[in-house]
Image: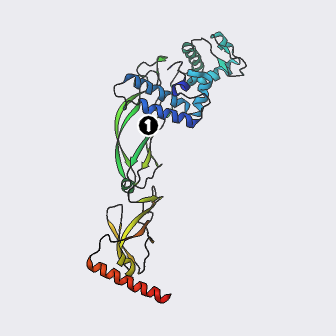
Amino acid sequence: MAGTDYYAVLGVKRDAGEKDIRSAYRKLARKHHPDVNPGDKASESRFKELNAAYEVLKDPEKRKKYDKYGDKWEYADQLEEQQRRAGSHDYFRRAGGAPADGAGAGGFDFGDADLGNDLGDILGGLFRGRGRTTTARRAQGENLEHSVEVTLEEAFNGTTRMIQLQVPEMCTVCGGTGKVAGAICHTCEGLGSLIKANRLEVKIPAGVDSGSRVRVAGKGHPGIGGGGSGDMILIVTVRPHDRFERKGDDLYVEAPALLADLALGGEIEVPTLRGTKLHLKVPEGTQNGRQFRLAGQGMPRLGGAGKGDLYAKVRAILPVTLSTRERELFEELRRIQSGVQAGVA
């Protein structure tokens, strides 16, 4: 990856914002993901490049160092420490580089110097001067995000998913440092990790909603130099339901009712996400479209106690065909209601 322009890899300008960088990465990662291009070595290599570029540019501190030092950004702290100790830029001039035109303190142009060896001398001398040997810096692994789609019933009850992942695992050859004896590790190409297929069963808790983020500890990117692995973050999307509508922790559903039950009062059935039915008593003269609240019959509250409510909207069932007797009764009802209205008038 030496000399690679991370901005060019993602196809963004150097002043691109975090949102643009994230959007460009996701678009290209989907296109070149090994699962989408099985056996395509070029896409696999491109996918590694994208990951390496995104890992740096998405992090403000890493990006700042990269903008200043290029592909030597990982050595920024040591370089600046060496500069402070030397008190000038003389060392870098001797190494073959020179301060960039108009650059202030810390603005370096390394020219054509072979910093692969020079940096080893800098770091080795620095650590030897302190009476200790060079060791890899320990760093916590980055989190890994994965999208998960569930049904409303699964969100209500909780569920599990078996996820097929191309998971980065620490390279055992270089121990996650990306280097072996000061040179780039050829096993992982300097990335410190290798992409391996992995199947992982994860638990989706009851009460999740679209946008919920479920953390799976220790299943993200591996750490560097013995640092702990990051976490996997599941980003949940709940599919719309053809019968129930969700608003927060509350559910809304239509409950069919006979005209006679609405007019005379009676008991109607209200469907639930469990597949069962609740019995709701409606008073005499209930109007079509009236809404009733059934407390505690809604969605479970994520990470908390209790549930939301279920709101049942009454929907009158109108007959499509009438028997002879039903027609007689409706005609009689119309005559009665017409007479009442005429009397009132």
Would residue 91 be seen by someone viewing this image from the given angle? no
Residue at position x 52%, y 18% from top? 2
298 up-or-down from 42: above or below: below
Crowding around mark 1 (Cα neighbors within 10 Å: few <14, some 14 to 19, many 20+) is many
- Give left or right: position of 121 versus 45: right
Q: Kindly identify which residue carries mark 1.
A: 220
- Judge whether residue 24 can be spotted in this image: yes
Please report the residue visible at 66 percent of the width from the left and 19 percent of the height from the top: 108
Quadrant of res 193:
top left
Q: Residue 13, image x and y in percent?
A: 59, 28
**Most distant residue in the left direction:** 324
From what the image shows, is residue 279 above or below residue 226?
below
**Residue closer to the observer: 31 or 343:** 343
Snapshot quadrant of residue 253: bottom left
Where disc 1 sits, the SS reads loop
Residue 251 in percent (x, y) is at: 43, 62
Callout 1, which amino acid?
A: Gly
Q: Residue at x 40, y 60 (%)?
A: 244
Say above or below: 247 vs 294: above
Q: Is 250 left or right of 256, judged from the image as shown?
A: right
Q: Residue at x 73, y 19 (%)?
A: 102
Name the residue nearer the viewer: 207 or 288.
Answer: 288
- 300 or 338, nearer to the observer: 338
Visual colour scheme = rainbow
Residue 128 x %, y %: 57, 18
